[in-house]
Amino acid sequence: MSESETTASATFSLEGPTPLLDEAEHELVGEARPLVFQAMRVSHGTLRSYGSRYDYDVEPIIDSFDGPEVSRSGNELTVTWRWDHEAAIYFNNGTSDHTVHGDPVLVFQFDRDEYPYLEEMFPHGTAFLPEVNVSGLPQSRFVQAGLEWLRQEVQ
């Protein structure tokens, strides 16, 4: 798995003679039910379970799926796929507890029935705060789940 500021991605590489790579490419990305898309479904299932468990909307991350990209170089085949949503890397790897600073303030709308203790300070249902301390995200490892499934399939 590789990462950047805005993507979570997986790369799968094989080495071998050209006929073997031709067959592998066909099975990975060229069939009616290519293995890479089946691996992506495993990743999406893992991510949806994570979202359900922690009450997160993960569909925008799933919708950002981009791939696969196939490249060949000599006797090597590389297939890469990615999720290009800015939160994908954080949902995959998790985050530690941290502080979010406003620029200059953070604005939150809240339900007064759900958070009655905030109503005294913010009677109109909108909170203005210079910063908030937030709990970190647990890691989902959704990218690795699909990649591990794929590795097991091609062994």
Image (cartoon, rainbow, N blue to C red):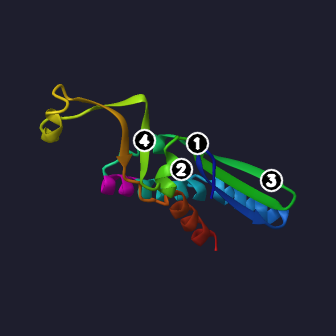
Q: Quick one: label 4 or label 1, which is nearer the N terminus?
A: 1
Count of numbered circles on the image: 4
Measuring 38% from the left and 53% from the top, which residue is drawn there? 48
Q: Quick one: label 1 or label 3, which is nearer the N terminus?
A: 1
Give the residue at mark 3. Answer: 72
Q: Quick one: label 1 or label 2, which is nearer the N terminus?
A: 1
Mark 4: which secondary structure?
strand
- Magenta stretch? 48-54
In space, the residues marked 3 and 2 are separated at their CA atoms by 27 Å
Mark 2: which secondary structure?
helix
User: Does the magenta-highlighted stretch encompass residue 114?
Assistant: no
Q: Look at label 3 and name its amino acid.
A: Arg
Give the residue at mark 1. Answer: 6
Question: Residues at badges 1 and 2 in contact (C-beta under 8 Å)?
Answer: yes
In space, the residues marked 1 and 2 are separated at their CA atoms by 7 Å
Q: Nearer the viewer, residue 19 or 93?
A: 93
Mark 2 vs mark 4: in front? 4
Give the residue at mark 4. Answer: 100
Mark 1: which secondary structure?
loop
Q: Look at label 2 and name its amino acid.
A: Ile
In space, the residues marked 3 and 4 are separated at their CA atoms by 43 Å
Mark 3: which secondary structure?
strand
Residue furthest out toward the bottom: 155
In space, the residues marked 4 and 1 are separated at their CA atoms by 18 Å
In space, the residues marked 1 and 3 are separated at their CA atoms by 25 Å
Picture coordinates of residue 74, whole percent (x, y): 87, 58
